[in-house]
């Protein structure tokens, strides 16, 4: 049996792993590369396998860096099944359509420049219709049921506690009268996080492929983050400014709405509007509302965990623009989470230079993104064809991350009854992986950090 690392190897994004056993060729995830131009160019390179020969895709969850190249896979000949949980399938529909729309818009802008410079035009990876063409290939699975995928391969999905529908996948491969087990962690969530369940531990495995996004960091205490959020709200309200929050549409936005809901109900919030300026996040919130089967006990106590009187949905461009003319203090939640695109960039354009305002990051900022640049202290940034001074206060809350930190990852691994034969560290930047690897080595675990495209015989 061979395992090839077709993405997320020594980088954070592009999750994609190829299992080959006999005639079986199975993918775990088919994600998009995100970040710098050098990294995103990988999306346009040929797959490291023939899509026509892939029989099945086992999908961990709906974030674009895990599912974003599925339409490209279908476009190039895949005709198998994509196994995912119900919530993941619902989220993929809106995420992949949105991804297609973003690509079409960005490609149109890029082609204006290319035509001016006499270069050949480019085409998006896929358009909206091609994204929709992938939907019929999705097939629903349930947690903690074992599925026979092929004659020699079985899979079992466990709740990863990352976002609704997210999964850790146990894969059992029968080969030469022996069954080997490989576990793909997906993205491991935090313990005691709101809305979703805690990550489900794995009893044992022969091989483990695990993310290491926060393998060198510790989050603030989850239990204290509402207080920290409230302090930044009040700080900005006192300045009579806008609290600008770049946020991913899926999970991060819903956790923010959930936190604001609790604070408003407790009478702790200033009487100000909270603008949710993201059509995708609005759609995702509707999906979160429907999938109550994935809620933890606390979230189930709320009839509507994400709604409160001061919340204003902004679907249209006109509604978004009106926020810039709004004179009172307010909170603006807009995509995307790393400020690489979306409506948050327009709010930065109008508000990043104003010391009355505060920018609050609530998630990981990948290397090469505008969010990372601002967070690291740049006093001047280039965006949307102009230079903008950074005079707003810059704040960060780590504990809103949907990823487990170093202690959380170790807790998840230590729950296994025996050590795996080998742990493959993926989905992380070099510093994070190196730190995580050193800690595991100290505890007697055998690890490997595969290269992009590397094939390993198990």
Image: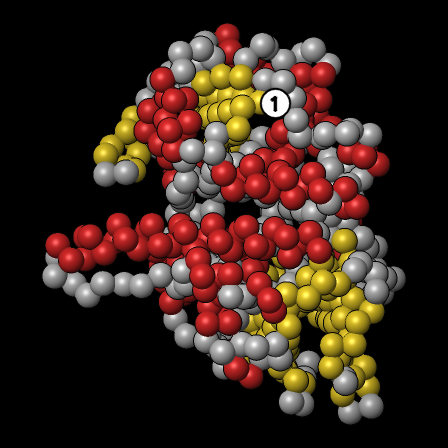
Residue 418 drawn above or below residue 303: below
Q: Disc 1 marks which residue?
A: 229
Quarter of the image for residue 118 reads bottom left
Q: As displayed, is residue 195 above or below residue 180? A: above
Q: Position of residue 153 (x, y in %)?
A: 75, 79
* Viewer-side residue, 325 vs 408: 325
x, y (%) of residue 262?
A: 71, 22
Residue pictured at 46% horizontal, 72% vertical: 75
- Which quarter of the figure is the N terminus placed in? bottom right
User: Label 1's element?
Assistant: helix
Residue 365: image location, x then y, percent: 49, 42
Q: Nearer the viewer, residue 63 or 355?
A: 63
152 with respect to 23 (left or right): right
Quadrant of the frame with the C terminus:
bottom right
Tally the numbered discs: 1
Tell which residue pokes out farthest to the right in this image.
417
């Amino acid at each position: 049996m061979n395992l090839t690392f077709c993405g997320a190897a020594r980088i954070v994004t592009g999750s994609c792993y190829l299992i080959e056993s006999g005639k079986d060729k199975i993918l775990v995830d088919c994600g998009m590369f995100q970040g710098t131009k050098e990294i995103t160019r990988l999306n346009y390179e040929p797959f490291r396998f023939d899509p026509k020969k892939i029989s099945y895709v086992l999908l961990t969850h709906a974030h674009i860096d895990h599912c974003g190249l599925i339409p490209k896979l279908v476009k190039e000949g895949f005709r198998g099944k994509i196994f995912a949980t119900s919530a993941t399938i619902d989220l993929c529909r809106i995420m992949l359509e949105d991804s297609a729309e973003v690509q079409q818009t960005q490609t149109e802008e890029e082609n204006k420049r290319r035509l001016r410079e006499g270069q050949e035009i480019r085409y998006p990876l896929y358009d909206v219709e091609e994204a929709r063409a992938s939907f019929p290939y999705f097939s629903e699975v349930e947690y903690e049921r074992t599925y026979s995928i092929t004659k020699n391969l079985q899979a079992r999905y466990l709740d990863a506690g990352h976002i609704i529908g997210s999964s850790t996948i146990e894969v059992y491969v029968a080969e030469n009268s022996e069954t080997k087990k490989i576990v793909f962690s997906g993205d491991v969530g935090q313990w005691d996080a709101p809305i979703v369940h805690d990550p489900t531990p794995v009893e044992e495995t022969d091989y483990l492929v695990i993310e290491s996004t926060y393998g060198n960091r510790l989050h603030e205490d989850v239990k204290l983050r509402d207080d920290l959020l409230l302090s930044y709200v009040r700080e900005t309200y006192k300045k009579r400014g806008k609290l600008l929050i770049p946020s991913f549409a899926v999970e991060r936005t819903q956790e923010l709405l959930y936190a604001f809901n609790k604070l408003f109900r407790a009478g702790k919030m200033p009487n100000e509007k909270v603008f949710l300026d993201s059509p995708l996040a609005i759609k995702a919130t509707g999906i979160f509302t429907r999938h109550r089967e994935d809620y933890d006990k606390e979230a189930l106590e709320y009839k509507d965990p994400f709604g409160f009187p001061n919340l204003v949905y902004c679907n249209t461009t006109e509604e978004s623009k009106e926020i810039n003319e709004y004179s009172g203090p307010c909170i603006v939640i807009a995509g995307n989470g790393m400020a690489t695109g979306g409506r948050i960039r327009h709010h930065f354009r109008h508000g990043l230079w104003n010391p009355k305002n505060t920018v609050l990051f609530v998630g990981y900022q990948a290397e090469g993104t505008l969010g990372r640049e601002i967070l690291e202290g740049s006093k001047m940034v280039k965006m949307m064809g102009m230079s903008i001074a950074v005079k707003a206060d810059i704040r960060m809350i780590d504990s809103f991350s949907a990823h487990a930190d170093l202690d959380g990852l170790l807790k998840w691994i230590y729950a296994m009854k025996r050590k795996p034969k080998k742990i493959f560290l993926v989905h992380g930047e070099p510093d994070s992986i190196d730190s995580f690897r050193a800690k595991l080595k100290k505890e007697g675990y055998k690890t490997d950090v595969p290269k992009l495209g590397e094939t390993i015989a198990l």
